[in-house]
Image: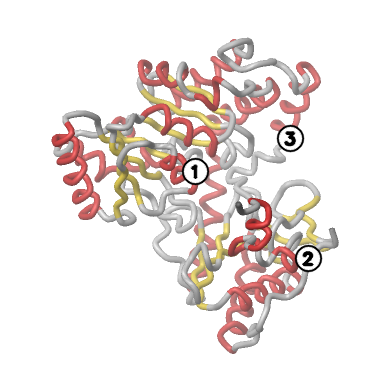
Amino acid sequence: MADIFERLIKNYGPIGQHRERAHGYFAFPKLEGEIGSRMNFRGKEVIVWSLNNYLGLANHPEVRKMDADASKEFGLASPMGARMMSGNTNHHEQLEKELAEFEQKEDAILLNFGYQGIMSTIDALCGRHDIIVYDAESHACIIDGLRLHPGHRYVFKHNDLEDFEKQMERSTALIKKQKAGGILVITEGVFGMAGDQGKLKEIVALKSKYDFRLLVDDAHGFGTLGKTGAGAGEEQGCQDGIDLYFSTFAKSMASIGAFLAGPRTIIDYIRYNIRSQIFAKSLPMPIVFGNLKRLDMLRTMPELKEKLWSNAMKLQKGLKERGFDIGNTDSVVTPIYMKGGVEEATLMVMDLRENYGIFCSIVVYPVIPKGHIIYRLIPTAAHNDEDIERTLKAFSETKAKLDEGAYKAEVIPDMADAR
């Protein structure tokens, strides 16, 4: 019999294999100081492009005051227990009511975490005869939710409507053959890696041709897209056709938790059957009050979204003018596509951090194919023109070094913290 621990130690995985050189620098880095566009990393000030603090609310004085006041009044323990048993309050229900109204849905349910919440939502919605059709670039939380599904699931090529229809025809035929079950389509409002919006309007239009329900994960669209900030469905004019709208508080609201909005009957079913909420402690009262405040600011302070988009457009325009490939993003998410290996990427990251004071997230193999590098920049309302200009200059200079082969290396440099 094999020892499970022994097997794990022999293979730490494609990312974990670099832990002894990467921990604390390339992986699990520690940003310190007040949350904002500039923070400290290993004793140096850096311009940060890795925080999903889209509207700059994380450190807003009004938000800080509400968080502090609610913590002083209630502490972090209240309410105790799961919502169903002893953890419900008028304030939890008020937040659900306001979220539902904001998203133009009948009802909403609070979820403790986005990742956990959507996994458990998929589990609650679908039985063994049901079929799930989903976009190939769906977030890891959706993929993990699909692993819980005991029935069939079919993937369609990213934002490819022709392939989507092929999978719908395939699914419809199987439903007819087994004479049981239905179809749930899952896609995203904004794909967080590439920044492109999902084809929501087109998929909704296909409801006249196929029989299915639509679940949209709009983590990056909520608060950033649409006239009021209600998200990608509002932006594309098809919010009514989205059966279940999901988003997290971790992006635009710079908080903890998530929600699901939709028809009252279905939300009520989920409320009484979603295992991750039935068997988990309720969101603490300071989090609920903090999210009520953040939602109010999102609705009543459109200047935050305007500033975010102004910064995003300046950054994206500047990158394109300098010849960078930012793909097909039509959101504030700003990817930069380059060629290079893992070793080159790590040296380029070091140069950006150590010599230019720029901190941003990088994606390499095995997340993407070998020989490719993606930098993902997240502009926020907290950034300013100087941040953008310094970043554009830094990327122009380091990209030239990359092209010249200055970052060639056999192994990634050892920048790990002592542990």
Q: Nearer the viewer, residue 214 or 146?
A: 146
Q: Residue at x 43, y 21 (%)?
A: 270
Give the number of the mark in front: 3 or 1.
1
- Which quadrant of the structure image shows residue 234? top left
Q: Position of residue 346 (x, y in %)?
A: 66, 72
Q: Position of residue 83 (x, y in %)?
A: 58, 16
Above/below status of 82 relative to 389: above
Quick one: label 1 or label 2, which is nearer the N terminus? 1
CA–CA distance between discs 1 and 2?
Answer: 28 Å
Residue with the mark numbered 3: 61
Q: Secondary structure at mark 2?
A: loop
Q: Position of residue 389 (x, y in %)?
A: 63, 67
Question: Quarter of the image holding residue 172?
Answer: top left
Q: Is residue 202 left or right of residue 141?
A: left
Q: Disc 1 marks which amino acid?
A: Cys
Q: Label 1: which residue?
A: 141
Classify mark 3: residues with Cα within 10 Å, few (<14), some (14-19) or many (20+): few
What amino acid type should be assigned to the residue bearing mark 3? Pro
Q: Is residue 144 left or right of residue 132?
A: right
Give the CA separation, mark 2 to mark 3: 35 Å
Q: Nearer the viewer, mark 2 or mark 3?
A: 2
The three-letter code of the residue at mark 2 reads: Ala
Identify the element where label 3 is drawn: helix
The structure residue drawn at horizontal position 42% and vertical position 65%, both measured from the top left corner, is 327
Residue annotated with mark 2: 416
Q: Please say if the residues under marks 1 and 2 sit with CB atoms less than 8 Å apart.
A: no
